[in-house]
Amino acid sequence: MTTPRTPRNPRNNLPAGQSPQERGRQKLATVLMWLYSWHTTVSPLVTELIATTETTYLRELEKKGYVKSFPAPRLLCGRAYMLTRDGVNAAASALGKELPYSTHPSSVSHSLLKHNLAVQRFAIDAYHKGFQVDPCQKSAERNGKIPDAFIETANGRFAVEIELEGKWHSELEQALNRHVNAISRGEWLGVVYVSNSTRLLRRYKKQLEAPIPDWWQPISTGAVKWIRGEPRPIELEMRENFYWMHTPELLKKFEQITC
């Protein structure tokens, strides 16, 4: 005969001195603000974000009208979530200002969805370690390629690049060159490359140890094509501003999930 398991009292999981109502408001605010910043997410990431054993929290918010699910055929679970107009209004009210946010599923790039979720996986780990990670938003001042995110530390801001499939040849040269130039201009202190592949990280690091050409666009002519300049060695002092982080389970959450 199987003995039924005793249900756990949800109060046992509450932080000291926090009522269930306060915990509920905190979870709601955290998830709404997360989606307001990152646009889309999936249930396993939200479960980790709010440190709960609940796996249906986003479904509950969908019933309350804060979020809506949409088909995500490239994910194993088949769907992801975004804010509704009511969710956007609640998040904007909590933040005190409005951010650009489209509530239309057509605004989601499905080809980049898994990559964007991997960036969130890194951001949630950093969040629970006391760091703030913000998605990099395109602006009128920055027309070219941008980092995946920025992580704020006690020393300053670092760019974050999540690499799953990897870059090669001129694309990799241009990416490394952009970071070298940005660090030189003081736009950020360094860059953290994160990947689930040690081979990829070793290849990037080896490329940085070789002379890298400048890449530039002749703006005066309005040309779109990038021009390859003369290779130049990257000094050791500059290379020390590049950090390499191997995260084997970067994609695991999206290969074996139920939503």
Image (cartoon, helix red, strand yellow):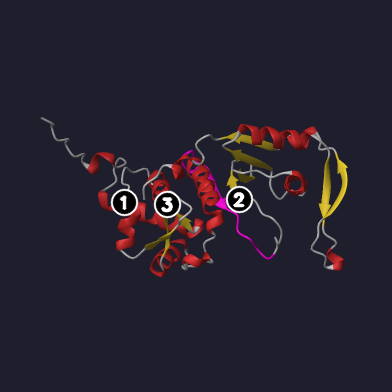
- Residue 163 x/y as whole percent: 61, 43
Q: Residues within 10 Å of mark 2 (few under 14, many from 20)?
A: some
Residue 20 locus on image (x, y percent): 26, 49
Horizontal arrangement in the rendering, residue 242 relative to residue 72 (left or right): right
Residues marked 2 and 1 touching at CB (< 8 Å): no
Q: Nearer the viewer, residue 248 or 18?
A: 248
Name the residue beneath numbered marker 3. Answer: 42
- In the rendered image, which quarter is residue 10 located in? top left
SS for dot 3 = loop
Residue labelled with disc 2: 148
Region rendered in magenta: 127-140
Q: Earlier in the sequence, mark 3 or mark 2?
A: 3
Viewer-nearest residue: 124 or 163:
163
> Tag 1's secondary structure?
loop
Q: Amino acid at mark 1?
A: Thr
Image position of 177 (left or right of 123): right
Q: Is residue 44 magenta?
A: no
Name the residue rendered at 28%, 40% in the picture: 13
Residue toward you, 78 or 86: 78
Are the two marked residues, 3 and 1, in contact with CB atoms closer than 8 angstroms? no
Of label 3 and label 1, which has the lower sequence position? 3
Q: Amino acid at mark 3?
A: Val
> Quick one: SS at disc 2?
loop
From the image, state whether disc 3 or disc 2 is nearer to you. Answer: 3
Residue beneath label 1, please? Answer: 56
Judging depth in this view, the residue of 37 and 217 nearest the camera is 217
